[in-house]
C-alpha cells in the first residue's frame, strides 16, 4: 500500500447523475474558474484527473492550439470524456490516457503546464501527489490547481440543520481519506511540494434570484445535488437521522427561494516548477 490512495469508495461515485453534476458545475462556473487560464498554441498541457471531460471542454475552448493530454484512473469516465469533448470540438487536440496520477507513464519534463481541478480533495496524500507531478513539468513550467472548500459555504436563511448536512458530506469524505476543506490548504501544499511563486486567488460564486442561472446551475444542481447524493451513506453510518437530514436539505433548498442567497468560495492556485 503506498502512502497515497484514491478514496475508496470515491465519495461522489461515477453515476450518470454525478456526470451530469460535474458537467453542470463546469459549464456554470467556466468563466469564474477558467478566466486567466489560457495556454499558448503548441504548448504541452497535462490535465490530471479529467473525469468525464467537464473541464477539458473549457481548456480546449480557452487554449485551442495547446496539445492537451488528459488522464484519469477511471476507464468509463475517460470514455465519456472523449465522447463529449469530441462531440463539441471534433478537431480538439486532446489525447486520452488511463493512468493513476501516482505513476504516470511520462518522462520527466514532458509538459509545459499541469491543470488539476477537483482532484486533490479525493487524495489521502495530496502533498505527495503534487511532489510526484512536479517531475513532469519542464523547469519553470506552471501548475494550476482548483479546489473547493465546504467550510466557505454560507447562506441566507442560515440554518444549523443545513450546516449539519453539509458537515455529513465533509465527514464522509474525510472517512474516505479525502478532504472537502482542502481549498484553504493549497498554498502550503504547493509550497511544501517544492513549487515556486505560488499565487492563490479565491473565486467566490454568489447566487441570488437576480442570477437565476447560478441558483439553478450552482446552488441547486451542483452544491445541493452533491450533498443530497450522500444521504444513504450518512444515514447508514449514523451521522444523522432521516428527520434532521430532511430538514437540513429543505433548508438548503430555501436558499434558492426568491429571498435566499448562497455563497461558496473556490480556491485557484498557480505556481511554477523550479
Ligand atoms: C471530482 S472528479 C473531477 C473531474 C474533473 N477534473 C472535473 O473537474 O470535472 C475527480 C476525478 O479524479 C479522478 N482521480 C481520483 N484519484 C485519481 C488517481 N489516483 N489517478 C487518476 N485520477 C484520479 C477520479 O477518477 C475522478 O474522475
Image: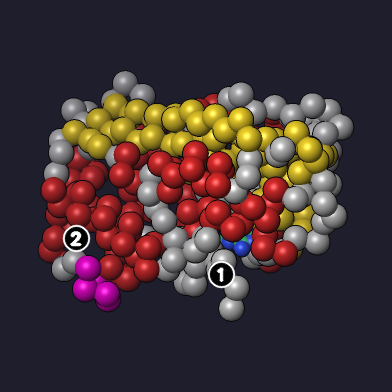
Q: Is residue 56 magenta?
A: no
- The image shows a total of numbered marks equal to 2
* Residue 27 spot, x, y in % from top left: 54, 36
* Residue 93 spot, x, y in % from top left: 83, 40
Q: Which residue is mark 2?
A: 245
Please, what secondary structure does the residue beneath circle 1 have?
loop
Disc 1 within 8 angstroms of ligand 1 (CB):
no
Q: Residue at x 48, y 43 (%)?
A: 188
Q: Residue at x 46, y 36 (%)?
A: 267
Crowding near the residue tagged with mark 1, few <14, some 14–19, many ≥20 C-alpha atoms within 10 Å: few
SS majority, magenta: loop
34 sits to left or right of 142: left
- In magenta, the rendered stretch is 235-239
Of tags 2 and 1, which is closer to the observer? 1
Q: Residue at x 63, y 40 (%)?
A: 195
Q: Residue at x 39, y 62 (%)?
A: 173
Colouring used for the render: secondary structure
- Choose between 10 and 211: the one closer to the eye: 10
The answer to whether residue 98 shows anywhere in this view is yes
Q: Which residue is mark 1?
A: 3
Please, what secondary structure does the residue beneath circle 2 have?
helix
Crowding near the residue tagged with mark 2, few <14, some 14–19, many ≥20 C-alpha atoms within 10 Å: many
Query: As displayed, is residue 105 above or below residue 259?
Result: below
* Residue 88 spot, x, y in % from top left: 71, 39
228 sits to left or right of 243: right
Label for residue 113? none
* Marks 2,1: beta carbons within 8 A: no
| Residue found at the very far bottom of the displayed protein | 1
Residue 41 picture quarter: top right
* Separation of marks 2 and 1 at Cα, in angstroms: 34 Å
Amino acid at each position: 500500500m503506498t502512502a497515497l490512495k484514491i478514496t475508496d469508495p470515491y465519495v461522489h461515485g461515477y453515476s450518470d447523475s454525478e456526470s451530469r453534476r460535474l458537467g453542470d458545475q463546469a459549464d456554470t462556473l467556466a468563466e469564474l474558474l477558467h478566466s486567466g487560464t489560457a495556454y499558448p498554441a503548441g504548448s504541452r498541457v497535462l490535465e490530471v484527473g479529467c473525469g468525464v471531460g467537464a473541464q477539458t471542454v473549457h481548456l480546449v475552448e480557452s487554449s485551442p492550439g495547446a496539445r492537451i493530454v488528459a488522464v484519469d484512473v477511471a476507464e468509463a469516465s475517460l470514455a465519456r470524456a472523449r465522447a463529449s469533448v469530441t462531440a463539441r470540438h471534433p478537431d480538439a487536440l486532446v489525447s486520452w490516457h488511463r493512468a493513476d496520477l501516482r505513476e504516470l507513464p511520462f518522462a520527466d519534463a514532458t509538459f509545459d503546464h499541469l491543470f488539476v481541478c477537483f482532484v486533490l480533495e479525493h487524495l489521502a496524500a495530496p502533498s505527495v501527489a503534487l511532489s510526484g507531478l512536479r517531475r513532469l513539468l519542464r523547469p519553470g513550467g506552471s501548475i494550476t490547481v482548483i479546489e473547493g472548500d465546504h467550510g466557505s459555504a454560507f447562506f441566507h436563511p442560515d440554518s444549523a440543520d443545513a450546516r449539519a448536512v453539509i458537515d455529513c458530506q465533509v465527514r464522509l469524505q474525510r472517512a474516505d481519506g479525502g478532504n472537502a476543506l482542502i481549498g484553504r490548504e493549497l498554498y502550503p501544499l504547493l509550497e511544501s511540494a517544492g513549487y515556486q511563486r505560488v499565487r492563490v486567488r479565491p473565486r467566490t460564486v454568489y447566487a441570488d434570484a437576480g442570477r437565476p442561472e447560478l441558483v439553478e446551475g450552482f446552488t441547486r444542481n451542483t452544491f445541493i445535488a452533491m450533498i443530497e447524493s450522500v444521504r444513504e451513506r450518512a444515514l447508514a453510518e449514523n451521522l444523522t437521522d432521516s428527520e434532521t437530514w430532511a430538514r437540513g436539505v429543505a433548508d438548503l433548498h430555501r436558499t434558492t427561494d426568491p429571498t435566499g442567497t448562497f455563497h461558496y468560495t473556490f480556491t485557484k492556485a498557480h505556481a511554477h516548477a523550479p
